[in-house]
Amino acid sequence: MTKIAVIGGGQIGEALTGGLIASGFDGQDIVVTNRRAERREEFEETYKVKTTDNNQEAVKGADVVFVCVKPYAIVDMFAEINDSLAKNAVVVSMAAAITLDKLEGAVGPQVSVVRSMPNTPMLVRNGMNIVVPGKNVTSEQLDTVKELLSTVGKVLEVTEDKMDVAAALAGSGPAYYFLVTEALIDAGVNLGLTREQASELANSTAAGAGQLLVESEQNASSLRYGVSSPGGTTVAALRELEESGIRGAFYRAIDKCVERTRSMN
């Protein structure tokens, strides 16, 4: 069985651990690190995994190491575990913005590194994980990483020059959908619905529309046309959104997201 280390038992680390266990991976093949003893106990009791507060001990013998820490700490963490990595281990960064050059520079020229960007729907095992393999990653190692990440959602491989844009759509994307849903709820409340009623209507509609986008053979434009009767109420609402600049706002938002990501590099 694949030996796995999860460095950082926070939100992303726990989502990944939960997905692995739910998919049949043996908890005794997984080591999760966290500084707090009570948090380690939670992992042991909930997922039956091994835990430690020592990152270097955790990665010894691991085939795949997922580093689930904040971007500002990722390079230092790679350097910390470098000397303890198994010879054929692959190290996966789950942090935004940090390039392969920086990651590979922190662990040395021989280590296999994958840059990944998850998103928060992985918490319900319906995430979108973007991966970029480094120069030392074998096809077998990449397949293993993809298999593990698929326990918490879909996986898309891109080249690194596309990573920042892909992350702006998928990594930050849930926030855009949450904002649109929040605005719909507020609009409903403004016109007399209770917040509970408006939330149920908007949330369920968002979930159903998302499922339809994924499962339908039609693209987003065709699905929108299907709701837009000529001269009807939906067309009137869509016209107001277009004239208010919603499409241009999204163009500018993605530009700003990518610009900020690249400034962090």
Image (cartoon, helix red, strand yellow):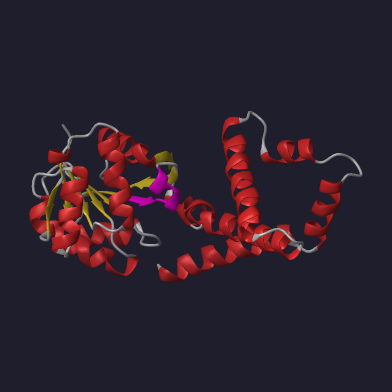
- Identify the residue shown where x is 81% and y is 41%: 228
- Identify the residue shown where x is 17% and y is 47%: 45
Return the residue nearer the eye: 190 or 47: 190
Q: Position of residue 104 (x, y in %)?
A: 26, 57
Whether residue 98 is visible:
yes
Q: Position of residue 19 (x, y in %)?
A: 31, 40
Locate the N terminus and report the quarter of the image it occupies: top left
Name the outermost residue toward the top.
Answer: 217
Q: Is residue 227 left or right of residue 162?
A: right
Q: Is residue 135 left or right of residue 85?
A: right
- Identify the residue shown where x is 42% and y is 70%: 264
Q: Is residue 219 left or right of residue 102?
A: right
Residue 103 part of the magenta segment: no
Residue 117 part of the magenta segment: yes
- Identify the residue shown where x is 65% and y is 49%: 201
Give, as a single range, the part of the protein colored magenta.
115-124
Locate the C terminus and report the quarter of the image it occupies: bottom left
